[in-house]
Image: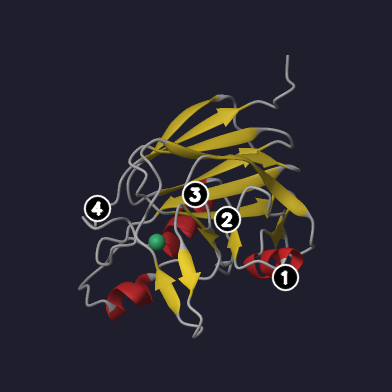
Amino acid sequence: MDFEEAGTLVLPAAHGKAICLRAGWRVRVVNPHGTQALDFWAFNAADPSEFLSMDNVRSFNSVAYVEKETALVTTQRRPIVCMTEDTSAGQHDTLLCACNPAIYRELGVKGYHRSCSDNLHEALGEIGWKVPFTPAPLNMFMSVDVRPDGSLDRILPRSKPGAHVELRAEFDAVLVFSNCPQDVTTINGPDRTPRDCVLKILPPADAP
Ligand SMILES: [Zn+2]
């Protein structure tokens, strides 16, 4: 497995990318427009059956959404990444599934439409991985409120242009990001336009 060197990658609108990070390395996820939702997954680089688990995150922290101090734990209940910075509006969603081909069919789309679920598997394929399931994603820059009656309120994106989240790998990990291709609903903003994001790979904070 090739681990990332320091540098900057543009994540094109509606596409995904897998990066391999050594323990202590960081990735700063920059949202140039502030409106783009990013689905995020993390896997143990040595064992893909251990991965960042939204149900374990909710159970471990007793929360419904993720903020900077939330422990981002795996199926083995150990932190895989730490959110070391967050200048977004916060309250990153853990409740909704990754968009997938069935959702776009449900929305009336004819023919193929890119999806976060397909982006995950396409990105993993680019590093030679095949994972036979789609874990629930952490939906960064996307907020969903639980109303008192238990229903969900999908909130319009509310981060400022240039907002960022920084994640540090707690052990060697494969991180996957998908710029959500949703252009039917308003989850990526009222103009329904998927946009690019930027990934800045940074060495450990205490590196010389
Ligand atoms: Zn999506």
Callout in the foreground (4, 2): 4
Q: In which quarter of the image is the C terminus?
A: top right
Residue 60 at x, y percent in the picture: 75, 65
Q: Label 4 vs label 1: CA separation?
A: 34 Å
- Characterize the local packing of mark 3: few (<14), some (14-19) or many (20 or more) Cα atoms within 10 angstroms: many
Disc 4 marks a residue whose amino acid type is: Thr
Mark number displayed over residue 177: 3
Q: Do the residues labelled 1 and 2 touch (CB within 8 Å)?
A: no
Which residue: 66% across, 58% down?
52
User: Is residue 173 toward the left or the right of residue 147 in the image?
Assistant: right
Of pointers 1 and 3, the one earlier in the residue sequence: 1
Looking at the rendered structure, the secondary structure element under dot 2 is strand
The residue that label 4 is drawn on is 193
- Characterize the local packing of mark 2: few (<14), some (14-19) or many (20 or more) Cα atoms within 10 angstroms: many
User: Is residue 27 toward the left or the right of residue 33 in the image?
Assistant: right
* Residue at the farthest bottom position: 149
Q: Label 1 vs label 2: CA separation?
A: 18 Å
Q: Label 3 vs label 4: CA separation?
A: 18 Å
Report if residue 175 is visible in the image. yes
Q: Label 3 vs label 2: CA separation?
A: 7 Å
Of pointers 3 and 4, the one earlier in the residue sequence: 3
